Amino acid sequence: MNYFMFFLGVILLLVTAADLINTSLSVRGAGFITKRLSKSIWSILLVINKKMGRRKILQIGGAVILVSILINWLLLIWISASLMFISDPGSLMNVETNSSTTVINKIFYTGYTLSTLGLGDMESTGDFWDVLTAILSFTGLILISIAITYLIPVVSAEITKRKISVYINTLGGSAEEILLNYWNGKDFKELEQPFISLIDSIILHAQNHKAYSVLHFFHSSDRKEAFVLNLTNLDEALTVLFHNIPAEQRPPFNVLIRLRKAISSYLVTLPATFIKPGKETPPVMVYTTLENKGIRILSGETVNLEYEKLKTRRQLLLSLIKDDGWEWTDLKTGSYNHEINMSETF
């Protein structure tokens, strides 16, 4: 027996199992292999699409990555099992000819066993290989079960994410529009109820994103449905309310701070998808339209210092937008439209 090849197969199997468990059965996000595979595929898709978020092909990115993860687990387990059987020339025999098997025969045998279809026209020789065959068969069954249990909650979490995104867009197609839509001539108190509705939803998505980091790669080419754009608009609206609007005109402070913390609970999960604050700081909103509506805007050194404290946060939001194929100028997603464009529906 070639012990080096056998233990190489064992190590590869253990590494794959650890990655599979960390990705699908824990709440810590993706495993080491899955995390890097997902990011690599997404980076290639972004390059192909010239980092243009409106390109519809990016919409299949999440599905492509999800399928690639499942195929990667299967291939790694198949390779590791094949290495173990190949390490011993006498591990298998052909039951029809009672002859030894080739390397290709062993690869076929392990794949056939993993698929839980049976053993084919070959069988293992000796108790050790019999037990290994049984373990391999169970591994295939477990892999199929985990694949199904992993797919369903990911799809459900993606639906939740899109629901949040569309809800934010109904408030306004930009940070400025959110504020204008809820200015009643004297304050922004009417934002209280929509903000309260968003708190639990965003916290839920943050936990989903932490458990299933592949969610980050599910993309919408429609700016009105793009989660990263709508969430950034919401966060920018909060920034203006916190620092540019007089306290007596804001929604209750406890509502604002709870929503801010909810968004932060999502932002802190981004490093798991290799998104970190960049060096570029996005521009501050121009307040001319708000002032023309009679809204009093606070400014000065104190406000500038507060924005400086938010520098890292806003740099992270910019990195998030760029990693989804958009630019900061795409934040004006457009108002909610009651008209239905049938050409987009079909």
Image (spheres, rainbow, N blue to C red):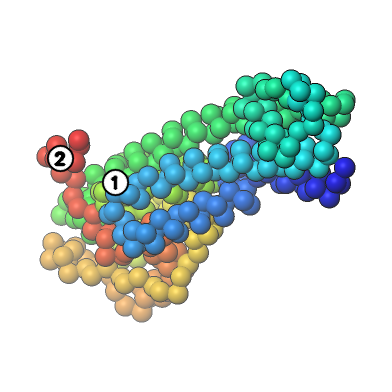
Quadrant where the N terminus sits is top right
Identify which residue is drawn at 44% across, 35% down.
Answer: 155
Identify which residue is drawn at 81% across, 42% down.
Answer: 87
Query: Sequence order check: which comes first, mark 1 or mark 2?
Result: 1
Do residues under tags 1 and 2 come within 8 Å of each other at their CB atoms? no
Mark nearer the viewer, 1 or 2: 2
**What secondary structure is found at the residue carrying circle 1?**
loop
Q: Is residue 212 visible?
A: yes
Residue 298: x and y in percent read 28, 70
Compared with 83, 263 (above or below) is below
In the picture of the structure, the residue carrying the numbered disc 2 is 343
Q: Amino acid at mark 2?
A: Ser
Q: Is residue 201 visible?
A: no
Compared with 311, 116 (above or below) is above
Q: Is residue 149 left or right of residue 116?
A: left
Q: Nearer the viewer, residue 114 or 41?
A: 114
Q: Nearer the viewer, residue 121 or 62?
A: 121
Toward which corner of the image does residue 286 lie, by quadrant?
Answer: bottom left
Q: Amino acid at mark 1?
A: Glu
In the picture of the structure, the residue carrying the numbered disc 1 is 225
Identify which residue is drawn at 35% across, 46% down.
Answer: 59
Residue 34: x and y in percent read 58, 48
Q: Residue furthest bottom?
A: 301
Residue 153's disc number: none
Q: Nearer the viewer, residue 110 or 136?
A: 110
Toward which corner of the image does residue 47 lie, by quadrant?
Answer: bottom left
Toward which corner of the image does residue 340 lie, by quadrant?
Answer: top left
Residue 17: x and y in percent read 69, 40
